[in-house]
Amino acid sequence: METIKIGLLGCGTVGTGIIKLLTDNRHKHEHYVGRPLVVKKILVSTLDKQRDACIDPSLLTLNPSEIIQDPEIDIVVEVIGGISYAKEWVKLSLAQGKNVVTANKDLMATAGEELFLLAAEQDVDLLFEASVGGGIPIISPLKHALASNRIDKVMGIINGTTNFILTKMYQDGSDFSEVLELAKEKGYAESDPTADIEGFDAARKIAILASIAFNTRVTFDDVYVEGITSISARDIEYAKELNCTIKLVGLATEIDGHVEARVHPVLLSLSHPLAKVDDIYNAVYVEGDAVGDVMFQGLGAGAMPTASAVVSDVLQVAKNIVKGVTPRDNCSCYEKKKIVGIEDTYAQYFIRMTVADRPGVLAQIAGLLGNNAVSIDSVIQKKYCQGKADLVLITERVQDKNIKKSIEQIKHLEPVQALESLIRVEKDS
Amino acid sequence: METIKIGLLGCGTVGTGIIKLLTDNRHKHEHYVGRPLVVKKILVSTLDKQRDACIDPSLLTLNPSEIIQDPEIDIVVEVIGGISYAKEWVKLSLAQGKNVVTANKDLMATAGEELFLLAAEQDVDLLFEASVGGGIPIISPLKHALASNRIDKVMGIINGTTNFILTKMYQDGSDFSEVLELAKEKGYAESDPTADIEGFDAARKIAILASIAFNTRVTFDDVYVEGITSISARDIEYAKELNCTIKLVGLATEIDGHVEARVHPVLLSLSHPLAKVDDIYNAVYVEGDAVGDVMFQGLGAGAMPTASAVVSDVLQVAKNIVKGVTPRDNCSCYEKKKIVGIEDTYAQYFIRMTVADRPGVLAQIAGLLGNNAVSIDSVIQKKYCQGKADLVLITERVQDKNIKKSIEQIKHLEPVQALESLIRVEKDS
């Protein structure tokens, strides 16, 4: 019987997971596709490394051309990560008429358009479910099972490292730097955690989700990003008092044909479904005009969850090959919508400051906010220590540029000793 | 430009929602499919009824043959519900080489095999996403986006009526009958609520999910069913004390090639993702060997959520027609696995009884359970009123036949005044 032949670029933990899954469930996969799947070659960076028993050493190669140029290989799976080599080899593979499955969010969030053009020229599939949310099916439901809807909003907890850190801070009242060390110990944070804690990883993922949801190209550079390094235990205390938690979210909306995409911490009402997604779990919450709100939750990282998404993509491509219909999906970005700059976005804000503890301070600050068209929704004021008070304001929904202007002015008010925090708020579910 | 032509069987609230959605989002749909979709005929039971403005009266017909026999119609959408006419017309449509999209859980849970055979003979698609979980994408992710996994367990809150009732009972401490009346007032329960509160609706849905998850036919008759009518406010009080809630779940597992499918209330640990799914929301929790646990959550009923799923299915079929690949999916039940009878299943149990408040009673009951191979995990005993005590036992994981035998014997013990409740427990997430 004819087989579908796979070439694997990269054989780290995810690559090994892919081989294991293709081996363990091969009978189910063969039934699904109608033909057996066979891994023909595996590109590695060194041959003499100890590997899992499921890896056949005779398949290893140091030469990418042995995969890319092999006319027998139907599907190239890229799990190298990063951009430089991955991009070069994915482009060469597409140019050779190979179908490609990738788990690479960096690549898709920066070079998606270029790759889709190549795939369309060659009539091949380019799938990338594993690039967002690890094993959680989110890209394919958003593209297909929700295709009937106009999507209005996508909001996701799409970075496990920061969700672990914020969950621990919420549960134990501990400080950011302390929990970051714990996350490193547990292997949930890398030794250089910048991409996670500064929100860059989440920004790549929300760029991908926004592109699919709104049928317009949104790249990493279009996404406004704030990380979680300035979130303090005290912010979380106040969040609790306001029946909220603090989460790092990727958020994308379309309003009147204008698209917003941003990553930042939010005070999230405890009644919101995402508020209950803790630890290293990821979840993506979607609002559609017909479906209402739906949420997809699961493990957003790890070798086997990622392999689950990659191999499911391989099965779709393989089925398409058998049916003779690659590419089944064209690039879904057929529109060119305006991306809204952060200064023109609207949000509710949580503002926390240390002020002199004397009469008239709140009136002075409230007056200044009013002059900048910033209305106040609620206030908490508490004595902090001798002569100092904590002042916490929640604003109504206001424009970003007005809040920024207000903050600049507030900082210079005599009674304001420190502007501690400025965090957006998502109250409605 | 050539169009894809749709015939709609039924035009109630869901049918109207479908027409509205096909109208509102037609540009997006045309992009997705590559051709415009057109509703050509709508079967109704009466012509002279007030209808939504989106319904073109010239499309209405009283004669199903005008749809089924029309050679121009590519896709028949069935939203009549029930079995008799729906089954007849779906079969006739398939026999005429029409692709069929249905929202009909009764039909799929009883006649799925017969319909799939017909669809395969005719090389047409038969899709039914809306039959489980309303708008939540669950059937297509389970079939495709999780296809790489061996699925071990599916557990869902798949009936909104009972979830609303149990949520209210949990939140307000109210009794079943009281909340049922409220649910009727709010339109969440029908005037005859039997199918919902006795678990039959959920049983049809778990039969469908189990068939897909385990690649073997599971019908409504294979599902063990208990409803929620005997759940009392007192059970819920104890559930709270045990850090649990009570939910009606559909549960299907495969262990060593043997499949179990059942619907019954469970005491569910508050740490389980499903425990946080409240009100009329539905959610399906899936365990796969690679993906770990994933959960899909959203509105399980309502005209527009159901229309979302139906129209998304229509878009898949339409795309398959354009690509020339119907049927893309064959019936996934290619195995014949043994269905385990309820007496051979294992579970933890919550047993609540009223006993005489005197020494030695617990010892007597514990001894009896021990003789039937039932181990006890934990005990709560409380004075109830003069001379009476509440005795609550949580067992270890034990076989159903042993618990049933124990209960029969316990009932006849002299100090046992009433066996109040026997509810299964799901503690691990």
Image (spheres, coloured by chain):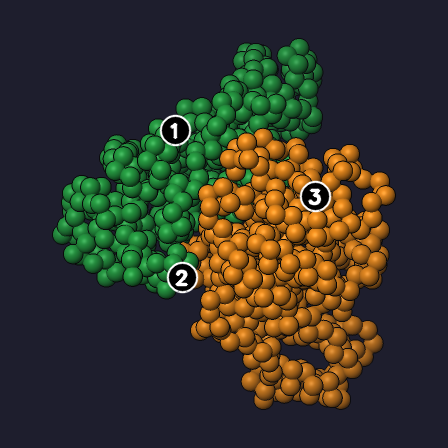
Chain colours: A orange, B green
* Chain containing mark 3: A
Looking at the rendered structure, the secondary structure element under dot 3 is strand
Image location (x, y in percent) of residue B147: 55, 39
Relative height, residue B233 to residue B71 (above, below): above
Front residue of A34 and A139: A34
Q: CA distance from mark 2 to mark 3?
A: 37 Å
Residue B236 located left or right of residue A106: left
- Residue receiving disc 2: B31
Sort mark 3 into few (<14), some (14-19) or many (20+) by Cα contacts within 10 Å. Answer: many
Q: Kindly identify the amino acid type of the residue bearing the numbered disc 3.
A: Lys
Q: CA distance from mark 1 to mark 3?
A: 40 Å
Q: Kindly identify the amino acid type of the residue bearing the numbered disc 1.
A: Glu
| Numbered mark located on residue A41 in the image | 3
Front residue of A45 and B188: A45
Image location (x, y in percent) of residue B190: 33, 41
| Residue located 52% across and 48% down the image | B297
| Numbered mark located on residue B104 in the image | none
* Chain containing mark 2: B
Q: Kindly identify the amino acid type of the residue bearing the numbered disc 2.
A: His
Front residue of A181 and B335: B335
| Numbered mark located on residue B113 in the image | 1
Image location (x, y in percent) of residue A355: 75, 80
Q: CA distance from mark 1 to mark 2?
A: 33 Å
Examine the image and state in which quarter residue B125 appears: top left
The answer to whether dots 2 and 3 both sit on one chain is no
Examine the image and state in which quarter residue A398 appears: bottom right
Sort mark 1 into few (<14), some (14-19) or many (20+) by Cα contacts within 10 Å. Answer: some
Residue A265 located left or right of residue B354: right
The answer to whether dots 1 and 3 both sit on one chain is no
Q: Quadrant of the N terminus of chain B?
A: bottom left
| Residue located 32% across and 49% down the image | B14
Image location (x, y in percent) of residue B162: 45, 39
